Amino acid sequence: MTSLTEIASFLRKRLTSNKLSQRELGEHAGIARRTLTGVLSGDADYKVSTLLAVLDRLGCELAIVPKSAAAGLANDGSFEPSAPNVKSVVDAARERLDKNPSSKKPK
């Protein structure tokens, strides 16, 4: 998310999915009705502490990631995971066994 409008849209969706009213959310988050209206409209700038309180009451957390990693967090299905570049411990062991078949025999 890169704008207050996008954040507001996300918060409104969470509000609906949590089946809360704006009044209930404001009371639970300790935020005045006017402030919450501004947050949910995307028109008003607000404190980070206000955003954290609203997110917490909606069952969310704020995560800050590098822009290059943000595409991986997209919920629109545009992210396609790539194959891992680093071998797992099991893959490395299998590769060693394949290179040295005599080590497979029980002693």
Image (tube, helix red, strand yellow):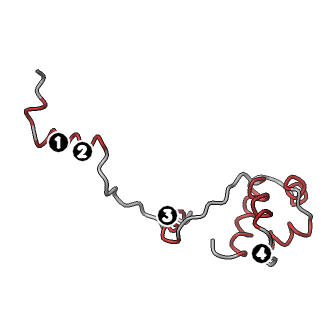
Front residue of 58 and 62 = 62
- Residue 20 drawn at (x, y percent): 83, 54
Q: Residue furthest bottom?
A: 43
Badge 1 local density, few (<14 within 10 Å), some, or many (20+)?
few
Marked residue nearer the N-terminal end (2 or 3): 3
Residue topped by disc 1: 96
Q: Quadrant of residue 53?
A: bottom right
64 sits to left or right of 56: left
Give the Cα distance between marks 1 and 4: 57 Å
| Label 2 vs label 4, nearer the camera | 2
> Residue shown at 72%/75% (left/top)?
5
Marked residue nearer the N-terminal end (4 or 3): 4
- Residue 27 drawn at (x, y percent): 90, 55
Residue topped by disc 4: 42
Marked residue nearer the N-terminal end (2 or 4): 4
Residue topped by disc 2: 92
Do the residues under discs 2 and 3 have CB atoms within 8 angstroms? no
> Residue shown at 67%/56% (left/top)?
61
15 sits to left or right of 99: right
